[in-house]
Amino acid sequence: MALQHAASGELIPLKRGDDDIAHFTSVALAKTENMELIRLVLPRDRDMPVHKVDGEITLLCLQGEIVCDAYGNSTLLRPGEMLYLLGGVPHGLRANEDAVALLTILLKP
């Protein structure tokens, strides 16, 4: 069964309920030729190893605390804070506490 992405103009709920974080499920919300929008769930103390993507990214913390390791620095993101990275930059993520973020990836054609 194919994943249903949001259509242009469609409302996308980011919070799924009071027990939202307990599901630990990341979901691709929308995808076009130029961009992918992902609701990223990071459980506490579970690392996302260092990796890189070709396109530029933004990471907006919605809930919890996320640490992004890039450029030899560790940047702490709290709710309402956003980080931007150029494409090809190696980075790793970890959550100090259960976290939810909105990840945007600009895709190169």
Image (cartoon, rainbow, N blue to C red):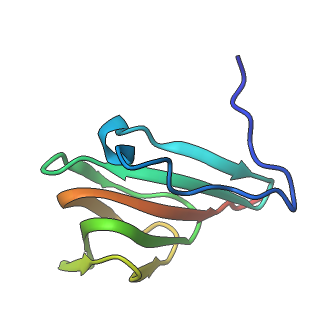
Q: Is residue 23 left or right of residue 1?
A: left
Q: Nearer the viewer, residue 89 or 24?
A: 24
Q: Position of residue 13 (x, y in %)?
A: 62, 55
- The quadrant of the picture occupied by the N terminus is top right
Q: Looking at this rendering, what residue extends furthest in the right direction? A: 8
The correct choice, above or below, for 60 with respect to 98 in the image is: below
Q: Looking at this rendering, what residue extends furthest in the front direction? A: 18
Q: Position of residue 8 (x, y in %)?
A: 87, 58
Q: Is residue 31 left or right of residue 74?
A: right
Residue, x 34% and y 64% (percent of image)?
Answer: 90
Q: Position of residue 6 (x, y in %)?
A: 77, 48
The correct choice, above or below, for 19 with respect to 73 in the image is: above
Q: Nearer the viewer, residue 72 or 102?
A: 102
- Residue 72 found in image quarter: bottom left
Q: Is residue 30 left or right of residue 87?
A: right
- The quadrant of the picture occupied by the C terminus is bottom right
Q: Position of residue 52 (x, y in %)?
A: 42, 58
Residue, x 87% and y 62% (percent of image)?
Answer: 9
